[in-house]
Image (cartoon, helix red, strand yellow):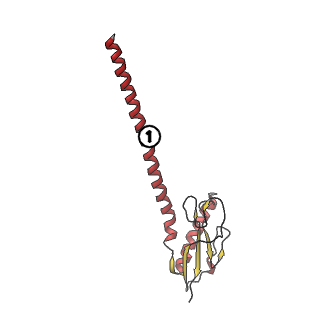
Amino acid sequence: MENASKALIIAGAILISILIVGLGVIIYNNVSGIASSSNLDEQAISAHNQPFESYFGDHISGTNVKALLSKVNANNRTAEANDEKIGNLIYVSIDGTPTTTGTVDASKIKTGRTYTVKLSDGGKYSDTESYGDTFWANGYIKSITITVNDK
């Protein structure tokens, strides 16, 4: 009888050890999944913003600004078609005049001039789904400011 009692105690200890190890593996998998998904989010944000950020600078030609506006309009058409305006739409302010729709009129941009293109930092666009006027809550660019340089 004494040996059977010891065998049951040993079996119970082994069962508890297996449960503890299994719980540790589950916790590890959950934590590593969270870490890798945040890294993927950063990569997705970078992949979305990079085509627009490549046009930022102080002396950008009118041709390059028109190319930027073409990319912005394509992005905005996709966002509107998928009904994803909040978080994906990019607003543009040209010489202090902000856009109020997703389509940006590039006719004000002259190819013989140079422009300063940067992220917006003013209070032109207000909503509850963004971090200020520069980025949406998901990290995507929300607004860009374009100003004409002096001749």
Q: Residue furthest top?
A: 1
Q: Residue at x 48, y 58 (%)?
A: 42
**Secondary structure under the numbered disc 1 in the rendered image:** helix
83 vs 129, nearest the viewer: 129
118 vs 7, nearest the viewer: 7
Q: Which residue is mark 1?
A: 27
Above or below residue 90? Residue 17 is above
Q: Is residue 38 left or right of residue 18?
A: right
For residue 135, which quarter of the picture?
A: bottom right
Above or below residue 15? Residue 131 is below
Q: Position of residue 129 (x, y in %)?
A: 62, 58
Q: Residue furthest right?
A: 100
Q: Position of residue 38 (x, y in %)?
A: 47, 53
Q: Looking at the image, how many numbered discs can be counted on the residues?
A: 1
Q: Amino acid at mark 1?
A: Ile
Q: Residue at x 49, y 67 (%)?
A: 50
Q: Position of residue 9 (x, y in %)?
A: 36, 20
Q: Position of residue 76 (x, y in %)?
A: 61, 65
Q: Residue at x 52, y 77 (%)?
A: 64
Q: Is residue 25 left or right of residue 99?
A: left
